[in-house]
Image (cartoon, rainbow, N blue to C red):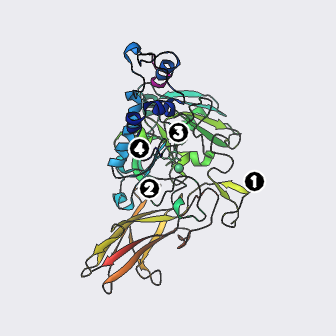
Amino acid sequence: MTDTKRGLCELYDDDPERADALVFGRRWQPDRRGFLKGAGLAAFSAAVGAAVPFARNLPGGLIPAALADETNWVAFVAESGLTVFNDRPINAETPAHLLDDDITPSRLHFVRNNGVMPEAVDAASWTLTVDGEVAKAATFTIADLNSRFEVVELALQLECAGNGRAGFNPPAQGNQWTVGAIGNARWRGVRYGDVLRAVGVKDGAVYTGHYGADTHLSGDPAKMPISRGLPIAKAMQPNTLIAFEMNGEPIPMLHGAPLRVVAPGWPGSVSQKWLTRIWVRDRVHDGEKMTGMSYRVPAHSVVPGSEVPKEDMRIIEAMPVKSVITRPQAGAAVAGATPLGARGHAWAGDRAVAAVDVSIDFGATWQRARLEPPANAGAWQTWSADVAFPQAGYYELWARATDDAGTMQPMVVPGWNPRGYLNNACHRIAVTVA
Ligand SMILES: Nc1nc2c(c(=O)[nH]1)N[C@H]1C(S)=C(S)[C@@H](COP(=O)(O)O)O[C@H]1N2
Ligand SMILES: [Mo]
């Protein structure tokens, strides 16, 4: 049984004992009358983070409402129109046609969780500690960040390094993202670099390490779901933010409430959500998912499906040039009389996009699209083109972006790698012209 298809609530309805075992990793122990006691009650209490004064009335096999909320997140994401891959942890991508807005609404922004989200957060008492290779370690509340540093609001694109993984053959394990693990929201916060300058980064510092308040799927408090970081230079880039607002509101829970890193153009995994600590390191950070095969690709191209020795893997830094077609919707049937208004966005890691071209003849000829400048460095760029079709029939619309260093998206899936990262092949959609 996959938990993707069936939410926790449903599972509780069908098989409360099994549901308890899944949620708590152990079976509850109801007494003879079916009420919770002993270790079962202790597990319930630990899960909700408080004593349960009316425990004597609590039936076994009743989902704690605090945990039922987690199921509601999945429903919330699905209702927004996202494609849900799993519910524990929640992972969901945005269908390309729902990415049409220049600024991605929060509800339509993809969600990538590696662990279990904190159950509740209190923005007023939240703190961020910055320590390690610094002159003076410090702890900031969000109010401190607001008052001590310049507050900026920027449109920033965030893409999961695994976006496009579904295109690799042989397949790579992990969420089979197609094209929708990308978003471009407005983020408000302070510059990461300003915070680092305030604590005084020592000469020997080379990397940062990020920690968040989410917990490991196993429930083991000694394990982190993810702890990645940034080279000091990227952390110091003026559009790398420690953000507390998304699209004019406090950051929603799914996207890292109340505080997160947003480092545009790099694998989304460096943009720690539910941020509690930045550890400035004298070496490359070696937190969870920094080492081994995670967020790394072979330094040289390899035979698809081959075993790659760990020492040949390098950390992914800036992401490659890429684009998406948001209009028309894939599979659209259009009238042929007037040219079709096609649209989408393009982005290029730390670079700018220089051009977007579209083709309707399987790449034989290309037409230059109009390309908007980014709202600011780190934002995606919107492109549009009026596409005329010579006659009725089946076409494919292809889009190809070129960055300001002249690097183009490949037409075919680029270098295979063990974990299926960095597939920036051109997006193509079917269009039928009447
Ligand atoms: N604390 C924490 N931060 C995290 C993650 C996580 O699981 N836990 N996932 C990372 C990954 S892999 C990505 S792609 C982005 C996704 O951000 P979003 O869910 O707001 O789209 O968050 C990153 N930050
Ligand atoms: Mo990611």
Tell me residue 245's x, y (percent).
Answer: 39, 40
Q: Earlier in the sequence, mark 3 or mark 2?
A: 3
> Tag 1's secondary structure?
helix
Q: Earlier in the sequence, mark 1 or mark 4?
A: 4
Q: Nearer the viewer, mark 2 or mark 1?
A: 1
Reading the image, the residue beneath label 1 is 311
Can I make out residue 288 in this image? Answer: yes
Residue placed furthest toward the front: 32
Contact flag, marks 1 and 3 (Cβ < 8 Å): no
Residue type at tag 3: Gly
Q: What's the magenta region?
A: 46-51
Please say if 222 is above or below 322: above
Reading the image, the residue beneath label 4 is 6
Reading the image, the residue beneath label 3 is 115
Question: Is 168 on the left-hand or right-hand side of 14?
Answer: right
Between 379 and 52, the one nearer to me in the picture: 52
Residue type at tag 2: Ala
Can I make out residue 201 in this image? Answer: no
Question: Is 333 on the left-hand or right-hand side of 195?
Answer: left
Q: Nearer the viewer, mark 2 or mark 4?
A: 4
Reading the image, the residue beneath label 2 is 379
Tell me residue 365's x, y (percent).
Answer: 45, 84
Contact flag, marks 1 and 4 (Cβ < 8 Å): no
Q: Earlier in the sequence, mark 2 or mark 4?
A: 4
Between 285 and 25, the one nearer to me in the picture: 25
Q: Nearer the viewer, mark 1 or mark 3?
A: 3
> Tag 4's secondary structure?
loop
